[in-house]
Amino acid sequence: MTRVLLVLLVFLFFALCVYGMWHGWKRRQAKQADLPAFPARPQTLGAPKLATTGVYIGTTNAGNWQDRVQVGDIGHRAEATLSLVPEGIAIDRTGATPIFIPAESIRDARTDRGLAGKVMFSEEGLLVVQWENQGHLFDTGFRGDDKEVYEELVAALSRKAIEHGGKA
C-alpha cells in the first residue's frame, strides 16, 4: 500500500510539473501576442549565394538570449537549411513553417555561444542574426553542421546590414 501511494505521489508531482510547463508556455504566448507578424516568404527566391544545413535554434527578443519567441511555431527547434539569397535569409525547417528574414531587415550578424536556452562549448557555436521587424529587434539562432561557413556568412550578412543601414 505504501509503495502504491508513493508511486501515485510521484506521478502527481510529474503531472503537476508538466502542467506548470504548459501553463508557462501559454502565458508566454499570450504575453507575446502583440509582436509583429513575421515576414512571409516570397513565392520565388533567387539562387542561394551560401547555404548550410543544421538546426534552427530559435528566435529571441534581441539583447535577451533566453527570451524565446513562442508565437505560432517560431519557438520550435527543427532541422533546417539556411540559405543566403539576394532577397535575404531563408530558413527551411523540417516539420515547421519556413522563416524568412528580408535583406533590408538585417541589422547585425555574429557567432555566439548561446541563444534560446541552447548553450555551446565554443564561442563560435551558433550563427546569430539580429534583424528588425516593424520596429522590434529579434535575434535568430542557427547551429550549422559546417561551422567553416560561419565566417563567410557573417561577412556577407554584415555587408547586407551595412547596405541597409544596420550596425555591422
Image (cartoon, rainbow, N blue to C red):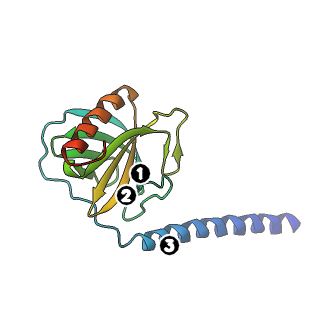
Q: Which amino acid is tagged 3?
A: Arg
Q: Residue at x 76, y 68 (%)?
A: 8
The kind of secondary structure element at disc 2 is loop
In the picture, measured across the screen, residue 103 lies left or right of residue 130, that is: left
x, y percent for residue 88: 21, 45
Cα separation between marks 1 and 3: 18 Å
x, y percent for residue 110: 38, 39
x, y percent for residue 27: 50, 72
Q: Residue at x 34, y 57 (%)?
A: 137
Instruction: Tell me which corner region of the image, top left, top right, bottom left or bottom right, holds residue 142.
Output: top left
Which residue is tagged 3? 27
Q: Which amino acid is tagged 2?
A: Ile
Which residue is tagged 2? 74
Cα separation between marks 3 and 2: 16 Å
* CB contact under 8 Å: marks 3 and 2: no
Foreground residue among 62 and 28: 62
Which residue is tagged 1? 58
Q: Residues within 10 Å of mark 2 (few under 14, many from 20)?
A: many
* CB contact under 8 Å: marks 1 and 2: yes
Between disc 1 and disc 2, whose residue precedes? 1
x, y percent for residue 152: 30, 29
The quadrant in which the N terminus is found is bottom right
Q: Residue at x 37, y 60 (%)?
A: 73
The kind of secondary structure element at disc 1 is strand
Between disc 3 and disc 2, whose residue precedes? 3
Foreground residue among 106 and 5: 106
